[in-house]
Structure formats: structure tokens, C-alpha cells
């Protein structure tokens, strides 16, 4: 990669395996919005930027060179060879085909606290509503940011949320999830859930500790591990991934544990990447969707 800073923009030349549509709209992050010119404006790590790809050049507006190295280089996982990952996973014929549909997916390295709340909100929810709830949370309780004449809001800290009441949180319209968000905030802000410690633990132990938070089940914990703590072996299993894996690899319905064991044996340390490629491939081809739902899709 070659980095060029021009004004308040950074141009990252030589970026491969990054498609912003595939990466920012595949359900791993919820604060990116596509603009009329095809670029994306998003808020992460207390900053707002606009991102677009021009051939093999990643262009980041409202970004200094210092911020690129401090935040966005890691956020977009630009030091990792996705060519090697895809080559390794392509030994599996199913994944080889799936990767062709999502060659530009990268795993974002997000803030773990934001991931905890976002995936608590995601449980039994659809992406438009998840985004709406998260935006309301940020608008009401996050600090203001400005870009291009528009006001954005940072994600509120665990300490700020922990000071609120359930009545305060009712404005985000998250329903029963309010109490889980508040409990998570109190757990993180008090140090009972120590995010820095979680980063040092193996995935199994870190998952156990995350699941001590009321409202954080296996799938939510796995998403936090994968997207917020860099545990790339994690293979989050929700109803869709279960159906997709059954459709592509099995002849009938399997237990979640059977699928988890299969993913660990089959994909090893690359389970998280495999999950994203499979999910995107299945979504694009409407695989693993019951017939009645497929008609509505």
C-alpha cells in the first residue's frame, strides 16, 4: 500500500479484496450509510468519515494521515492478506464457489463495546430496525460530530449509558432489549466485564465471560468475539447460518452444536471469514430460505 494525504483526505493505493458494498452492508456493522454518489459515510471509533473505492484506491474523506494509521488502517483490516485467506478457504469446493460472490468482504475491527450493544439489539431483529434503534441511541446519548454540514453522533460510552434509567432508554424504542443494554453498560463500566482482558483470553473463555451479561447469548457473544475482539475462528450461528450450513453441507436439520463442531473442524482459525462468505453467498442466491419466505424476498 502507498498512502497519500491531500488536505483532509487520505488516498490508500494498492488496496485489494475490498468491496465497500459487500463489507459495509453484510450485517457486521450498522452505522454506515450509502450516499447518492456510491460512497459510504459512517461513524466509528468516535469519528465520522466518508469512504469510497476508486479502482484499487481507498479514499477516506474527513480523515488525517494520523487518524488513518491510528484507527482506519486496522478498522478496515488493511494489513491482512485476504488473497491468502481466500486461497486457503477455496480448498473447500462450497466455499470456493461462495467466495466468488463476496470476494470483496473484509472483517471490520470494531469497538467491542459498540459490538456488544449492537448485537444485543440485533437479536430477533432486521437490519433496518437495528440501524434505526442504534441511530436513536447515538442521537440521544452520543456526543455530536460534524461533517460536510451535517450533524452525526458518536456511539455513547458504557459509562454514559450506565448512568441512565430504563425510562431514559425508552426513547430508542428497543423494547425488552433496554434492560439488556443497561445491564451490559453497568457490567462494562464497572469492570465486571473487562474488554481489555477479554482480548487476551482464548475465544472459549472470553465467550463464557460475555455470556454472563444478561441478554448475551451464544450468537451475540460470537459476533462480539469476531467483530469486536478479533477472534477470527468464531463462527456465529443464527437461524440463517444454521439453515445455510444445513443446505450446503448436510442432508437435513442439525443441532447448533453439530454445526459449531463442523465449522471448527472444517474452517479452523478462519471460521469467521468462512461464515461471512457463506452468509453473503446465501443471501445473494436466497439459499436456505423457506419457500414461503423466498416468495416475499
Image: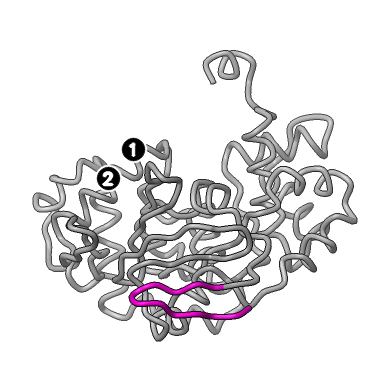
Q: How is the image coloured?
A: one colour
Query: Where 142 falls versus 246 (above or below)?
Result: below
Mark 1, residues whose alpha carbon is within 10 Å: few (<14), some, or many (≥20)? some
Q: Which secondary structure lies at badge 1?
A: helix
Say whether residue 106 is magenta.
Answer: no
As drawn, the label of residue 129 is 1
In the rendered view of the protein, which quadrant contains the C terminus? top right
Residue 105 visible within the image: yes
* Residue 13 or residue 282, whichever sits in front: 13
* Residue 273 or residue 121, whichever sits in front: 273
Q: Quadrant of residue 281?
A: top right
- Tell me residue 181's x, y (percent): 28, 57
Mark 2 in CB contact with mark 1 (< 8 angstroms): yes
Q: CA distance from mark 2 to mark 1?
A: 6 Å
- Residue receiving disc 2: 133
Q: Which secondary structure lies at badge 2?
A: helix
Range of magenta residues? 1-12
Mark 2, residues whose alpha carbon is within 10 Å: few (<14), some, or many (≥20)? many
- Tell me residue 133's x, y (percent): 27, 45
What is the magenta segment's predominant secondary structure?
A: strand
Seen at 40% across and 51% down, the residue is 30
Left or right position of 163 against 133: left
- Tell me residue 258's x, y (percent): 75, 47
- Number of numbered tags placed on the structure image: 2
Amino acid at each position: 500500500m502507498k498512502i497519500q494525504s491531500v488536505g483532509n483526505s487520505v488516498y490508500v493505493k494498492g488496496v485489494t479484496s475490498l468491496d465497500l458494498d459487500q463489507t459495509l452492508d453484510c450485517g457486521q456493522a450498522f452505522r454506515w450509510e450509502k450516499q447518492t454518489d456510491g460512497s459510504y459515510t459512517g461513524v466509528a471509533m468516535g469519528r465520522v468519515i466518508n469512504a469510497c473505492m476508486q479502482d484499487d484506491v481507498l479514499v477516506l474523506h474527513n480523515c488525517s494521515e494520523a487518524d488513518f494509521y491510528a484507527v482506519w488502517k486496522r478498522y478496515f483490516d488493511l494489513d491482512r492478506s485476504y488473497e491468502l485467506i481466500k486461497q486457503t478457504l477455496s480448498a473447500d469446493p462450497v466455499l470456493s464457489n461462495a467466495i466468488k460472490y463476496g470476494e470483496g468482504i473484509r472483517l471490520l475491527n470494531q469497538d467491542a463495546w459498540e459490538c456488544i450493544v449492537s448485537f444485543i439489539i440485533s437479536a430477533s431483529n432486521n437490519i433496518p430496525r437495528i440501524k434505526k434503534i442504534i441511530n436513536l441511541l447515538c442521537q440521544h446519548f452520543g456526543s455530536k460530530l460534524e461533517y460536510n454540514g451535517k450533524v452525526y453522533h458518536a456511539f455513547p460510552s458504557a459509562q454514559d449509558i450506565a448512568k441512565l434509567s430504563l425510562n431514559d432508554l425508552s426513547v430508542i424504542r428497543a423494547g425488552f432489549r433496554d434492560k439488556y443494554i443497561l445491564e451490559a453498560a453497568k457490567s462494562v463500566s464497572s469492570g465486571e466485564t473487562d474488554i481489555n482482558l477479554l482480548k487476551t483470553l482464548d475465544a472459549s473463555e472470553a465467550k463464557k465471560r460475555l455470556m454472563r451479561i444478561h441478554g448475551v447469548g451464544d450468537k451475540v457473544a460470537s459476533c462480539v468475539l469476531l467483530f469486536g475482539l478479533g477472534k477470527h475462528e468464531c463462527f456465529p450461528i443464527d437461524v440463517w447460518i444454521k439453515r445455510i450450513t444445513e443446505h450446503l453441507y448436510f442432508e437435513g436439520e442439525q443441532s447448533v452444536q453439530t454445526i459449531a463442531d463442523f465449522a471448527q473442524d472444517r474452517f479452523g482459525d478462519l471460521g469467521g471469514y468462512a461464515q461471512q462468505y457463506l452468509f453473503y453467498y446465501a443471501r445473494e442466491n436466497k439459499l436456505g430460505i423457506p419457500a414461503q419466505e423466498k416468495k416475499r424476498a
